[in-house]
Image (cartoon, grey):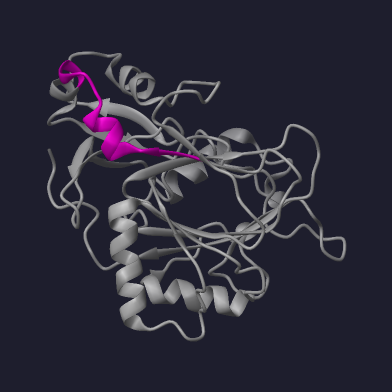
Amino acid sequence: MGVVVKDFNVDTVTSEDIDRLKQSIYRDKVAVLRNQGDITPEQFVKLGHMFGELVSYHEPMYHHPDFEEIFVSSNIPEDGKQIGVPKTGKFWHADYQFMPQPFAFTIFSPKVLPPKNRGTFFINMAKAYEALPQELKDAAAGTTSSHSVRKFFKIRPDDVYRPLGEIIREVEEHTPAVTFPTVMEHPVTGEKILFISEGFTVELHGSDDPDLLDKLFDATGQLDQEFAHPNIYQHAYEPGDIVIWDNRTLIHRALHTTTPAATVSHRVTALDGLPLYARAL
């Protein structure tokens, strides 16, 4: 899974180059742009716009101070202030899976890397669906699944001392659960995708088996705490990497260090103008 792109330059890349790169990401799921350590936040946003309509994260505490399109994960204060949010994404998910329009592309740029245990785990949910036993494929067919941020919503600084029930009600009002087909067809590749994640998928509808969702989590590798399941691919970042992936097909989970270490990453996310899926299956 994935391709490596060398000699990429955001200031000289052509629209034809970007079109080729998009097609490669749809096909190969991950593209790694090497040696991009000098890219500025302004250039990073420019790169994101080349892939489609950028969507700023719905919670402002994640925003870059100068470019709201950039989602910041950081445990390094700047001038005594917290910029972004530390330790994000330590659970299986597709970005914005809990919103009416999940993203097409995630574009990720680690800015400060820890000396070890650095990277992201991925599962290709098209390949994972393909590998399911036929009885699970049959059970999932025609069902729908609901997705919510409620399990992993991070408390905001201004939530301190607020009643928990009030915060939960606010989360449910601002980001109510959304429902999509459990199995869907990719609008570009035609692949069958199992569109669920252990982090955001909270309920499966249309099945007589109350344990079906957990069975699908287990079969796809999302319950493997050792990350040894054959569906799991780990990308270990090199300094200067920018990684772009197909957010329809891949779910991912951050690999955080077990000991304190400085980490900073930037992310932009784009819609590609296509529907989330071609048809439900």
Q: Can residue 159 be seen in this view?
A: yes
Q: Does the magenta stretch include residue 236?
A: no
Residue 31 spot, x, y in % from top left: 43, 58
Tell me: 52 left or right of 109: left
Residue 274: x, y in percent? 23, 63
Say which of 170 and 37 sits in front: 37
**x 55%, y 21%: residue:** 226
129 displayed left or right of 88: left
In x, y percent, where is residue 68?
A: 57, 70
Does the magenta portion include 126?
yes
> Residue pushed farthest front?
6
Q: Quick check: 267 left or right of 38?
A: left
Q: Is residue 195 visible?
A: no
Q: What residue lies at 79% left-to-right and 34% top-to-bottom?
A: 259
Total number of numbered discs in the rendering: 0
- Tell me: residue 50, above or below residue 151: below
What range is drawn magenta here?
A: 121-136
Q: Which corner quadrant holds the C terminus?
A: top left
Q: In which quarter of the image is residue 275?
A: bottom left
* Residue 273: quadrant of the picture: bottom left
Q: What is the residue that sits farthest to the bottom in this orientation?
A: 12
